[in-house]
């Protein structure tokens, strides 16, 4: 059974600071996703990481994937209040031959950025 | 980007009634759609995978006779919660995968409250 673990689950930080959210997963997969969810809303796609060593950046967010370590990171640079949200990583098992499908999500990281 | 819609966005029903939720891919064809459920303050849990023209694949612990899924076309999947009970109250989110892309696009979600 695929397990996806995120840490921290809760993070309060000040504007201007840097921080990293970690996502570990338990079985082989080379597709990992990061999503943002605002309260009461659905998911907004942030990054799709499709291969080992993949690194993607959008604004103050940067995501990377190490498939050998089964680890992805979401790095926040010089945080601003607008980035306050819950961030989920998810792993896709489709096509892996394991019989599973869809995405398996981590528990999410609730991020609060204080002015 | 690709757009996925859901209808209704919010529904309140009495215990014992059935509720149908529609998920549509508006500007692309989706051979596969997924249904997730999210309880308050929790992560998303995959309920089932819906493939156009075939029976849905349900995750372990999800009752297929209670959560009826129909994927009649490449742009529409429906989830019917039959004989709803208060414990079925949740946020139901669908997603759709484009044929040529790896990512899943999520609908805005349907908030179900069963009284």
Image (cartoon, helix red, strand yellow):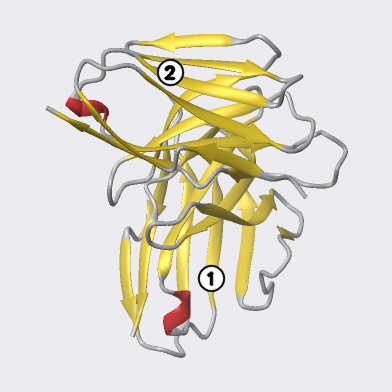
Q: Which mark is residue B48?
A: none
Drawn side of residue B52 relative to residue B33, left or right: right
Q: Is residue A68 above or below residue A84?
A: above
Identify the residue under disc 2: A75
What subunit carries mark 1? B
Quarter of the figure that contains the C terminus of chain B? bottom left
Drawn side of residue A49 relative to residue B64, left or right: left
List x then y, in percent, for residue B30.
61, 38
Question: Which residue shows up at 52% across the image and 86% down it?
Answer: B83
List x then y, in percent, for residue B21.
46, 63
Can you tell which quarter of the image residue B101 is in? top right
Quarter of the figure that contains the N terminus of chain B? top left
Q: Nearer the viewer, mark 2 or mark 1?
A: 2
Can you tell which quarter of the image residue A19 is in? top left
Question: Which residue shows up at 26% across the image and 33% down it?
Answer: A84
**Of residues B85 and A64, which is closer to you in this image?**
A64
Q: Which mark is residue B80?
A: 1
**Of residues B29 and B38, which is closer to you in this image?**
B38
Q: Is residue A94 above or below residue B83?
A: above
- Could you tell me which secondary element the residue under label 1 belongs to? strand
List x then y, in percent, for residue A6.
53, 38
What subunit carries mark 2? A
């Amino acid at each position: 059974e695929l397990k996806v673990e995120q840490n921290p689950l809760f993070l309060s930080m000040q504007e201007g600071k840097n921080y990293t959210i970690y996502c570990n997963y338990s079985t082989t997969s080379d597709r990992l996703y990061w999503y943002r969810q605002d309260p009461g809303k659905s998911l907004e796609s942030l990054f799709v990481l499709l291969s080992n060593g993949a690194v993607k950046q959008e604004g103050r967010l940067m995501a990377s994937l190490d498939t050998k370590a089964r680890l992805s990171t979401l790095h926040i640079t010089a945080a601003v209040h607008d980035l306050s949200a819950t961030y989920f990583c998810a792993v896709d098992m489709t096509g892996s031959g394991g019989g599973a499908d869809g995405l398996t999500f981590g528990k999410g990281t609730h991020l609060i950025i204080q002015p | 980007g690709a757009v996925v819609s859901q209808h209704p966005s919010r529904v309140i029903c009495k215990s014992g009634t059935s509720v149908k939720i529609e998920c549509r891919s508006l500007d692309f064809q989706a051979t596969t759609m997924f249904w997730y459920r999210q309880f308050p303050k929790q992560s998303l849990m995959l309920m089932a995978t819906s493939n156009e023209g075939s029976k849905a694949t349900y995750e372990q612990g999800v009752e297929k006779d209670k959560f009826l899924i129909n994927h009649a076309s490449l742009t529409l999947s429906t989830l019917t919660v039959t004989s709803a009970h208060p414990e079925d109250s949740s946020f139901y989110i669908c997603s759709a995968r484009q044929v040529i892309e790896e990512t899943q696009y999520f609908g805005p979600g349907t908030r179900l409250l069963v009284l």
